[in-house]
Amino acid sequence: MDQERLEELVLAHQAEIYRYVRYLGADPATAADLVQDTFLAVFQGADLPDFANVRARAAWLREIARLRFLMFCRRRRTSPVDVSSERLEQAVVVGVALHLGE
């Protein structure tokens, strides 16, 4: 895909894809990143299908954005959490205190 065609696509659909990703549950910063990832995937992929229908092209872009959002959610869910031992000990003390009713 040439850069000029991609620019037209971004200008025509960027706001709509951003709203869609926000609707799916992404925070504003993540949504902006996912929109960028969506258009990057389009640019790196095969040629843009020749959609005469703008609604079909928008649906195609929303599907790419949805898949990017799902991949983001999977990565986030499986990412390790770094907890310091000091914070863990504090949590145990608070948990024990709550359990004992202190």
Image (cartoon, rainbow, N blue to C red):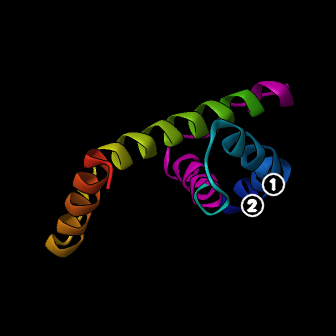
Q: As displayed, is residue 24 above or below residue 1?
A: above
The residue under label 2 is 4
* Marks 1, 2: nearer the viewer: 1
Q: Residue at x 58, y 58 (%)?
A: 30
For badge 2, the amino acid type reads Glu
Between residue 25 and residue 72, name the one nearer to us: 25
Q: Quadrant of the C terminus?
A: bottom left
Q: As displayed, is residue 82 above or below residue 70?
A: below
Disc marking residue 97: none
The residue under label 1 is 8
Measured from the top left, where is residue 72 in percent x and y? 44, 46
For residue 94, what is the image quadrant?
bottom left
Between residue 55 and residue 91, name the one nearer to us: 91
Looking at the rendering, the stretch of residues picked out in magenta corresponds to 31-57
Between residue 52 and residue 102, name the one nearer to us: 102
Between residue 57 and residue 77, name the one nearer to us: 77
Q: Residue at x 50, y 44 (%)?
A: 45
